[in-house]
Image: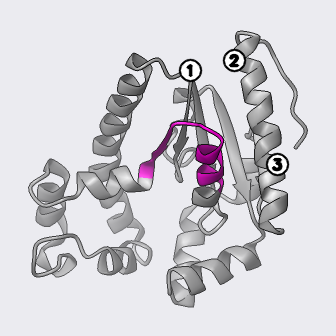
Amino acid sequence: MLKIAVTGGAGSGKSTVLRMFADLGAPVIDADQVCREVVLPGRPAWEELHRAFGPECFHPDGTLNRAAMAHLVFADPEARARLNAIIHPQAAREIQAKLRELESRGAELVMVEVPLLFEAGLEKSYDRVIVVYAGEEDQVSRLATRDRRDSGEIGGILKAQMPLKDKLARADFVVDNSGPLSRTEEQVKTIWAGLQKILTTKGETVTVSR
């Protein structure tokens, strides 16, 4: 099974690109959704987070207050490291379980959205890497509008991630999502065709234009 990681910067449009691949028939795994699942009340990661950060980072019903946690960790690198050390191993196990399930069902290819692929050193777990690109102005605008984050928090998010130019240098494929969605979709279809060719040629090297 060909395992494809979809990554990029915050606000670059990874989820949009993943949906486009899903529309083309790709099985997809959303790492952000997996992270939401592993911190549900009663799960081991939830227990660890509660001990590490206290009740102020949780809603009255016990669910994680993601806004409060984000405000804390993007202002405090040590808190961010504690959070990642708790969530990442749990999420990685869940993703591996989902991959095994898809493979057992005969899937030839799967797309996995992994926002912190390079930061967490996970790139070797995947056969190909797609980096979704957008300019920093676009990233800031999307984070402010879509996620309603303030400038301080946005700065912390971008600073916590590897610069997009460094991710681009390590990509097998790049989707430039700084223009209209129709252009993004064209790039996705081109990459999809290239991946299908990889499958039919049993992994031989195939060049796809960026």
Q: How is the image coloured?
A: one colour
Instruction: Tell me if residue 169 can be seen.
Output: no
Circle 1: element type: loop
Q: Nearer the viewer, residue 13 or 21?
A: 21
Q: Nearer the viewer, residue 101 or 39?
A: 101
Circle 2: element type: helix
Q: Earlier in the sequence, mark 3 or mark 1?
A: 1
Question: Label 1: how many residues lie within 10 Å, few (<14), some (14-19) or many (20+)?
Answer: some
Q: CA distance from mark 3 to mark 1?
A: 21 Å
* Proximity of marks 3 and 2: CB atoms separated by less than 8 Å: no
Residue 124: image quadrant is top right
* Region of the chain picked out in magenta, as a range: 17-31
* Proximity of marks 1 and 2: CB atoms separated by less than 8 Å: yes
Q: Which mark is residue 97?
A: none
Confirm whether the magenta stretch covers residue 179: no
The three-letter amino acid code for the residue at tag 1 is Glu
The quarter of the picture where the C terminus appears is top right
Q: Which mark is residue 187?
A: 3
Q: Is residue 80 above or below residue 123?
A: below
Confirm whether the magenta stretch covers residue 19: yes
Q: Earlier in the sequence, mark 3 or mark 2?
A: 3
Q: Which residue is mark 1?
A: 108
* Residue 58 position within the rendered picture, expressed as x and y whole percent measured from the top left: 18, 76
Q: Which residue is mark 2?
A: 199
Q: Nearer the viewer, residue 78 or 96?
A: 96
Question: Label 2: how many residues lie within 10 Å, few (<14), some (14-19) or many (20+)?
Answer: some
Circle 3: element type: helix
The three-letter amino acid code for the residue at tag 2 is Leu
Q: CA distance from mark 3 to mark 2?
A: 19 Å
